[in-house]
Each structure stands twice: as C-alpha cells, then as structure tokens.
Image: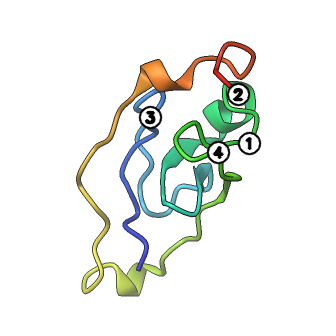
C-alpha cells in the first residue's frame, strides 16, 4: 500500500492525500509537480525512476489506511537537472 508521504522532498510543500500535484517514483519518493517538472525534469533524483502522478486514495479508505506523517526533506539532492550528476 502506498505510504502517501505528506510533503515534497525538494521544497517541503505539503501534499495531503488528495493533492493533485503529488508525483511519485516506484519507490514512493514524493515531489510536488512544480519541482518534478522544473528541477527534476520528471526523473527521481534518488533512484532515477520516472515520476508519475500519485493516485488519490478514496476519502472513505483513509481512516483504516492513513497517510504517512513522516516528512522526508532533501533539498540538496534536488538541484536543477542540469546541475545534478547524471
């Protein structure tokens, strides 16, 4: 089950479970769409995987399957794509 992490790992923007701009890779690294597009160019800086829109968990499922409250922040790993190591 997806963790539904609560924030963007680059800019720390809040990404609640129903956020339409949450992007994830296959390891559930989580970023806002703005960082995914502009800084990361659609590629996860942690695993090099493709960033895709995070699914929305239905509200009636959140009580028994709550989102994570663990915030992960690594702005140093989120430089512009042209400055990140390939």
Of discs 2 and 3, which sits in the foreground? 2
Packing grade of label 4 (10 A; few <14, some 14-19, many >=20) is few
Q: Nearer the viewer, residue 23 or 28?
A: 28
Closer to the camera in the image, 60 or 84 = 84
Q: Residue furthest top?
A: 83
Residue sitting at x 66%, y 33% = 34
Q: Is mark 3 on a helix, strand or loop?
A: loop
The residue that label 2 is drawn on is 86
Distance between the Cα atoms at labels 4 and 1? 9 Å
Q: State the CA–CA distance, disc 4 to disc 3.
A: 21 Å
Q: In which quarter of the image is the N terminus?
A: bottom left
Q: Which mark is residue 13?
A: 3
Q: Name the residue under label 1.
A: 42
Q: Name the residue under label 4.
A: 48
Image quadrant assignment for residue 84: top right
Q: Is residue 10 shown left or right of residue 22?
A: left
Depth check: give the residue in front, 2 or 6. 2
Question: For residue 15, which numbered disc appears in the image?
Answer: none
Mark 1 and mark 2: span between their CA atoms? Answer: 14 Å
Vertical placement of 1 versus 72: above or below? below
Q: Residues within 10 Å of mark 2 (few under 14, many from 20)?
A: few
Give the residue drawn at x 58%, y 18%: 79
């Amino acid at each position: 089950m997806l963790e539904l992490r609560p924030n963007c790992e680059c800019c720390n923007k809040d990404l609640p479970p129903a956020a339409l701009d949450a992007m994830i890779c296959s390891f559930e690294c989580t970023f806002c769409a703005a960082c995914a597009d502009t800084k990361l160019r659609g590629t996860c800086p942690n695993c090099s995987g493709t960033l895709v829109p995070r699914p929305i968990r239905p509200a009636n499922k959140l009580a028994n399957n709550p989102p994570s409250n663990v915030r992960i922040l690594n702005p140093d790993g989120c430089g512009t794509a042209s400055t990140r190591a390939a």
